[in-house]
Image (cartoon, helix red, strand yellow):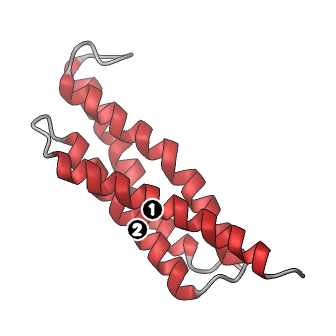
Amino acid sequence: MITITPIYSVPLALLLIFLSIRIIQIRSKNGVAIGFQSDDYLQRAIRVQANFVEYVPFSLVLISFAELREISVLVIHILCIMLVLGRFLHAYGVSQVAEDLRFRQVGMGLTFSCLIFACLAVTASYILNFD
């Protein structure tokens, strides 16, 4: 049963809503319906949201699979924390026009680590459990 992953999906969903509303506000303020029209701030806001959508759903699916395979509760919490923290750090870092790359790098590092460890956990659960 999946009981942990849904809890962590809440702050991620709220972050997605925030990122989406920010794009809408910037578009409205600058009168930009499509694209970013050379607006660096809007381009960054669009990429932050897109990057979020590219990584979060599949990460949550993998973590859910790990949870279904009854991987340790501690491991599931660690994977979820890595994902949430990674996405918040990445969103903050990339949103800054004068970007401090450390936020982006740590954010992506945590996201990639979450994906890799979730893959390993799911794979190991099948290799080590032959039922």
Instruction: Return the disc, 1 or 2, that comes first in the chain's sequence.
Output: 2
Q: How many circles with numbers are drawn on the protein?
A: 2
**Residue drawn at point x = 50 percent, y = 53 percent:** 56
Q: Secondary structure at mark 2?
A: helix
Q: Quadrant of the N terminus?
A: bottom right
Q: Secondary structure at mark 1?
A: helix
**Residue drawn at point x = 78 percent, y = 74 percent:** 127
The type of residue carrying mark 1 is Ser
Q: Vertical placement of 40 versus 53: above or below? A: above
**Residue to which mark 2 is pinned:** 82
Circles 1 and 2, Cβ within 8 Å, touching? The answer is yes
**Residue to which mark 1 is pinned:** 113
Nearest to the observer: residue 36 or residue 76: 76
The reply to whether residue 103 is visible in this rendering is: yes
The type of residue carrying mark 2 is Met
Image side of residue 89 versus residue 4, left or right: left
Q: Vertical placement of 13 versus 70: above or below? A: above
Nearest to the observer: residue 9 or residue 104: 104
Residue extending farthest to the right is: 131
**x, y percentage for residue 113?**
45, 62
**Residue drawn at point x = 60 percent, y = 86 percent:** 72
| Residue 7, numbered label | none
Q: Quadrant of the C terminus?
A: bottom right
Image side of residue 45 versus residue 119, left or right: left
The reply to whether residue 13 is visible in this rendering is: no
**x, y percentage for residue 5?**
56, 72
The quadrant in which residue 49 appears is top left
Residue extending farthest to the bottom is: 73
Q: Vertical placement of 34 versus 98: above or below? A: above
Q: How many C-alpha atoms fall within 10 Å of the one at disc 1: few (<14), some, or many (≥20)?
A: some
**x, y percentage for residue 24?**
33, 32
Marks 1 and 2 sit apart, C-alpha to C-alpha, by: 8 Å
